Image (cartoon, rainbow, N blue to C red):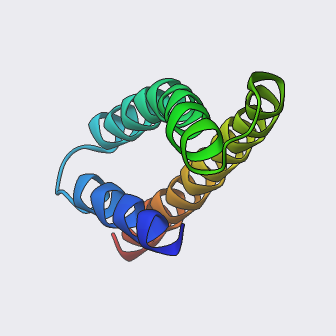
Amino acid sequence: WRTYCDFLLCVTSLIYFRNEGSLTSTLRTLLFFSALMITLPVGLYFSSKAYVFEGSLGMSDRDSYFYAAIVAVVTVHVVLALFVYVAWNEGSRQWREGKQD
């Protein structure tokens, strides 16, 4: 998870540190995290259910549904936390730039 979170922070920093307008940067960040919020939990739900819980661990369908749902919920929380982190840093960066003017 740590490597994956570092990867997401790296990708968001590439979007975040571009010298663009404030509104464009904010909209780009919002769209990026919206796409992550849709694709990542759904993808991890089905892949963890099929490959991890049923495939590797040999769990029943009922148990694998339950644990895959937990993985999806944790993923949603991680994406939300990353969004708050990036939005907070973007706001403080804009505040610092506005203060220097």
Percent x, y for residue 45?
59, 31
Q: Total of numbered circles in the picture?
A: 0
Quadrant in the picture for the C terminus: bottom left
Q: Is residue 42 left or right of residue 7?
A: right
Which residue does the image show at 35% across and 35% down from the upper left? 23
Q: Quadrant of the N terminus?
A: bottom right
Tell me which corner region of the image, top left, top right, bottom left or bottom right, holds residue 63.
top right
Is residue 44 visible in the rendered structure shown here?
Answer: yes
Outermost residue, front direction?
58
Residue that sits furthest to the left in the current view: 19
- Asked whether 30 or 48 is in front, the reply is 48
Frontmost residue, 64 versus 71: 64
Residue 98 visible? The answer is no
Identify the residue at image location x=26%, y=52%: 15
Toward which corner of the image does residue 68 lie, by quadrant?
A: top right
Q: Percent x, y for residue 17?
A: 25, 63
Q: Is residue 19 positioned above or below 24 on the image? A: below
Q: Residue at x 74, y 23 (%)?
A: 61
Query: Where in the figure is residue 79, as x and y percent of width and height?
Result: 58, 46
Q: Residue at x 31, y 63 (%)?
A: 13
Q: Which of the pair 7/84 is nearer the observer?
A: 7
Return the residue nearer the eye: 87 or 80: 80
Horizontally, residue 71 falls left or right of residue 5, namely: right
Residue 74 in the figure: left or right of residue 92: right
On the image, the x and y values in percent for residue 34 come to 48, 28
